[in-house]
Amino acid sequence: MIVVLVVASGAAWESAALGLLTEHREIVVLKRCVDVDDLVASASAGQADVAVLGLDTPGLDVAVVEHLRRYAVRPVAVVPAPALEAGRLRAARIGIAALVADDDLEALPGAVLDGDTLPPPELPTPLPGGGAAAAVPAAAGGRVTAVWGPAGAPGRTTVAAGLAAELARRRSRTVLVDADPYGGSVAQQLGILDEVSGLLSAARLATGGLLEERFASVQRAVGPHLSVVTGLPRADRWVEVRPGALEHLLDVAREHAEVVVDTGFSLEEDPGQDFGTRPARNQLTLAALDAADEVLVVGAADPVGLSRLARALVDVREHVAGAPVRVVVNRMRPSLGWSEKDIAGMVGGFTRLSGLHFLPDDRPAVDRALVAGRTLVESGDSPLLRALSSLADALV
């Protein structure tokens, strides 16, 4: 005997589906749920085996499907026949394998009893870490470069924005993603007035399996070849980005462009996540490093900055598996009293690097860009821009 929950939100097929299910001798309809919240609560009781639901039911997303599977409730989705192909893709992205068209409800009892009724789409793209299938492999043309650095504001955002602008200047389609869980600053630095956070919008679309179709809506263009996914408007909103959302965003972005990610500073695990469903605060930073094809570690050239950089290189080695690591020593200036060779000797003793780069302390160029809300490329030639160009040469 198969026990079924039904949620259709008043869809036209609901009455016919209930009739077919109740007439079958091996199926018992336990409850007709009024909405997704009612479905989730009913599934938690552990009495149901299958949930029959409309694919367009408000609130249906990866989290709901995960919850159903946690309580051994298999979802079967009913999809409008005219949108069958699009429905197949969305169902795969949120982890639903069994589909029935609303003009073929005679197949519904069989789907409830037997499982899948349609083969999976050729290119399923569920939320990484949230669905049962694997994510689409990254396209060969796009790479993800994560810009990370220790606490103390060594210049992560300045380097990330400058590098992205330099790549775009070379006519490479580039997406700059602000993934700092302690509050984004890319939008402010580039003078972007964004009422809606691109990162939060992308997280919601990814959870609902719609990011691929609406990826353009989460970006803000700042040039013909450069766009920005703006970050968190407030630091306390990191809880709205579910695990797997950033990875999915980066996978989608790298299919379209070169991707530069501005990350947070902390790599600490959150012990509190073991006692609830809340995501870890630093999971955004850790996810960016895991997804990166190359990692830039930014450190300041002063004594405090170099000390933090040394410890950071030890920490990042434990979190980056296989991706090349480059060190960018920012704000180099003669008044410090040491040379690039001196710093190279110190940094080389902590980890194996793919490259070591130095950026000058060019405050006038940075100030011109900040005050105007422009990229360094738009602000004219400067020593810092030339150094970033050399860094882009090395990455390319």
Image (tube, rainbow, N blue to C red):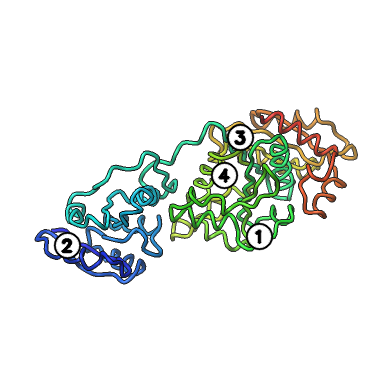
Residue 288 numbered tag: 4
Quarter holding the N terminus is bottom left
**In which quadrant of the rendered view does residue 47 lie?**
bottom left
Residue designated by label 2: 21
Of circles 2 and 4, the one toward us is: 2
Residue 36 place in picture, x, y as percent: 35, 66
Inspect the image, locate mark 2, and give the three-letter code of the amino acid beneath it. Answer: Leu
Residue 169 place in picture, x, y as percent: 73, 38
Question: Which element type, helix, strand or loop, lies under badge 4?
Answer: helix
Left or right: residue 120 versus residue 322 is left
Disc 2 + disc 1, Cβ < 8 Å: no
Inspect the image, locate mark 1, and give the three-letter code of the amino acid beneath it. Answer: Asp
Measured Cα–Cα span from mark 2 to mark 4: 46 Å
Furthest residue toward left = 25
**Residue depicted at 85% across the width and 37% down the height:** 383
**In which quadrant of the rendered view does residue 74 lie?**
bottom left
Measured Cα–Cα span from mark 3 to mark 4: 10 Å
Residue designated by label 1: 194
Give whichever of discs 2 and 4 has the lower sequence position: 2
Tally the numbered discs.
4
Question: Which element type, helix, strand or loop, lies under badge 1?
Answer: loop
Give whichever of discs 4 and 1 has the lower sequence position: 1
